[in-house]
Image: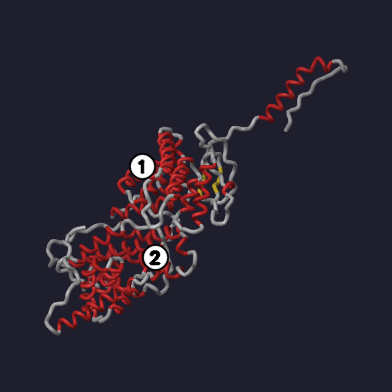
Amino acid sequence: MPDFEFVNLENPGDVKRHSTKIRRHVMKDIGKARRKPRPKKREVVIGETGESSSSGAASGDGERVSPSRVLSHPNPRADDNIHTYVYPVAMDEERMDLVRFVIDEAKSAYRPFRFTWITMGLSDAAAWYITLANAALYRDFKAGTKKPEFYTNSDAMKWYTKSLSSITKRLQDPAETEGEGLVVAITGFVCHDASVGTFDRYRVHMDGLQHIINKKGGLEALSSPLLKVMISWLDLAGATYFNVKPRFSVPDNAIKVVDTGNDCRYLERLLQSWDAECPALGDIMSAMKATASVANYINQRSNSPDFWTDDVTMARLLGPAFHEVLTLEGRPLPNDTSDPQYSGTAAREAFRRAALVFLAAIKIRMGAGAYEMEKHLEAFRQISQLPLVDWGVIPELNLWAHIISAMQEETPSRAWHVLTIVDIMGTMGLQTGNQAVDIARGIIWVDAIDDGKSTLLCREIDNYLAASTAQQTQDIPPSTNADALPEIIEDW
């Protein structure tokens, strides 16, 4: 509203006498109109829908001081107008070319969490620089090869350095550590480490990220649902690789309850018999049920054309199952093979490792990769070769565990699995590979990760059974199809 000031004039000649006062008043109003209010530096909320404001003024180094805004999800799949996005840094043609590459590549190649990360990257300058670094890497990436490190690409290294410099500078400013921008940026570094499999460096970056998050009150204290899901997913990538408990709890927005209907009746009946037949297995029931819930959720929905590209939902689904399996306490294997707990303890670890192999196979099916797979397969090989284990303890579940692990092995590496599977089949009166696989299918199974592997395994089982029958008629021990069995390691 205008600020009026009144001047008393007794005759027309008084105008000249008051002209200076009038001019000053008018110029004061003009100055107020021209002056723009200084924007306040406030928090950016990621992943909520809303109206975005302008991107703010660029500072000397190209980073923009962003006003308070609610950052809406960009939808690159449907919107090619990348100039409508609100960027946290000044964007020149070189930078826009990298964004165009990401959008164009998405039309022909799916990468999990691509658009999830773009959403988060747009909230912070350092996070956006690491986004540009990844775009530069993928622009020169050859399909079928492992994702390279930043230092192998000069353009990627340039943006990586800018991101690192921004983070280092802001860590010295207590005010900067109060917001979530640094959390997003450091999450970008953790994400790259996990995607290239450099887990020693991953651990260093995750230690720093955990320290900042703990100072904020924990993962649930963060405001962005997307950010919480992404951090939890990356936490589980390290926990499964190192075979340790996760650092953070299951996010509140995880899919913790799945209506399985009657799909788990067979598993439930088997679990009910554990307390009587093998008390050592009691504490693993929740982990097995959680893994079965994942399988049932996928089996009910995987025919949907967009199911396997809904990365955020998959992360919310797999998270609780991974937590249940990874938080189980380790148990030492008794030295005495006659100990009543010996076979049960071995079976418990076999079930736990098989569940991790199963969940890793789902990650691979969704395109996320699973560096932990080989580590858990190797551990299962060691367990399956322990001496004098009675795999007839809960034979159905032991059969499931060996079949699940054997399906992820190459033929030469699963000879011992085939031997054990045939032994378990003998205790159950099964005569063909299909009968054995049908038992496993009734426990925990996802057809989408089979991809013909069970058919090949059935063929190997049946071939061994046929050879065994033929050789038994001549009193000749059957061949194991293995030149040498690996050395047995008794702890894990």
The residue at the point 49 percent across, 54 percent down is 105
- Give 263 or 221, whichever is nearer the viewer: 263
Asked where in the image residue 335 lies, by quadrant, the reply is bottom left
**Alpha-carbon neighbours of circle 1 within 10 Å: few (<14), some, or many (≥20)?**
some
Seen in the picture, residue 39 relative to 81 is either above or below; the reply is above
Q: Amino acid at mark 1?
A: Gly
**In this figure, which residue is indicated by the disc labeled 1?**
208
**In this figure, which residue is indicated by the disc labeled 2?**
294
Inter-mark Cα distance, 1 to 2: 31 Å
Seen in the picture, residue 32 relative to 89 is either above or below; the reply is above
Q: Amino acid at mark 2?
A: Val
**Alpha-carbon neighbours of circle 2 within 10 Å: few (<14), some, or many (≥20)?**
many
Residue 456 visible to an observer of this rendering: yes
Task: Indicate left or right for 59 with 444 as reference.
Answer: right
Asked where in the image residue 387 lies, by quadrant, the reply is bottom left
> For the residue labelled by badge 1, is the local secondary structure a helix, a strand or a loop?
helix
Q: Earlier in the sequence, mark 1 or mark 2?
A: 1
* Residue 208 point in image, percent of width and height: 36, 42
